[in-house]
Image: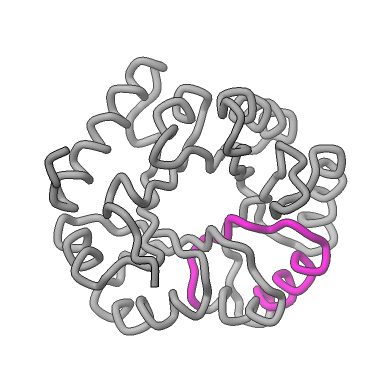
Amino acid sequence: MTLMSVSENLSLIQEKIDAVAAGAERASDDVQLVAVSKKQPEGRIQEALGAGHRTFGENRVQEAQERWGALRATYTDLKLHLIGPLQTNKAGDAVALFDVIETVDREKLARILGKEMEKQSRALPCFIQVNTGDEEQKAGISLDALDGFYVFCTKECGLNIIGLMCIPPINEEPERHFKLLAARAKALGLKHLSMGMSGDFERAISCGATYVRVGTGVFGARSKA
C-alpha cells in the first residue's frame, strides 16, 4: 500500500463522502468529517490544519488541552469534538475547551454538564452515546433507557441534545446498529447521527450519518505510546 499524505487522505475521504452522499440523494455538506486526532504526532495535525481541515475529535480532555489550548488562538474556526468517555471531574474542563460533546451517557454526567454549561454560559451541542450492542464493557446508555434519558437531559439538565452517537460491536455487521440508531433518532426528532469510523464510514453515511469519525483513514496508524 502506497503511503499517502494527510492532505491526500483528507481529499480521498471527502471524495468518498461526496460520492456516497450523492448516491443517497443527500448534499455532501450534510456529512461532516471529524478527524480523530488522539495520540497523533504534531506534524500530522499541522498537515491537516494546513490542508484546511478544522473539525477534530479527541478522546481525552487532558490530551486535548495540551494539543489544542494554544492552537485556539491561531485557528479560531476550530471545532473540537469530545468523542471519548468523560469523567465527571473533567466536565468543567471539557465544557471550556470543546465545541461538541458526543458522549453523554449517564445521569450524573448529564447533570454536572448542565450545571457547568450554565456556569460558563456555554450551551454546547451534545450527543447521547447509545450502547446499541448492549456491551457490558462499553460506555453508552442502553436502548431501553434512551427515551427517558433524553427527557432527563433536555428537561431536567437543560442540555442541547442534537443527536445520537454509537460505536457498533466490533464483531457484528455495523449496518444493523447504524439503522437502529437512525430509527431512534428519528423517533426522538433528532437531526444528527455520529456514527461510522475508518472502516465503515461509507456504510454509516448510507444509513444517515451526519458526522463520521475517521482517525486511521486520515492520519495513519496511531502512536502506541
Percent position (x, y) of residue 169?
A: 63, 38
Is residue 54 shown left or right of residue 173?
A: left
Residue 179 covered by magenta stretch: no
Is residue 145 shown left or right of residue 16?
A: right
Percent position (x, y) of residue 110?
A: 75, 64
Can you say which quadrant of the picture contains the N terminus?
top left
Snapshot colouring:
one colour
Residues shaded magenta: 97-118
- Comparing 47 with 81, the one in front is 47
Q: Residue at 19% of width from left, 53% of height from top?
A: 6
Q: Does 112 appear above or below 214?
A: below
Percent position (x, y) of residue 147?
A: 83, 41
Q: Residue at 69% of width from left, 52% of height from top?
A: 138
Q: Does 100 appear above or below 136?
A: below
Q: Does 123 appear above or below 196?
A: below
Percent position (x, y) of residue 35?
A: 35, 53
Q: Residue at 57% of width from left, 38% of height from top?
A: 170
Q: Residue at 48% of width from left, 60% of height from top?
A: 81
Tell me which corner region of the image, top left, top right, bottom left or bottom right, holds residue 115: bottom right
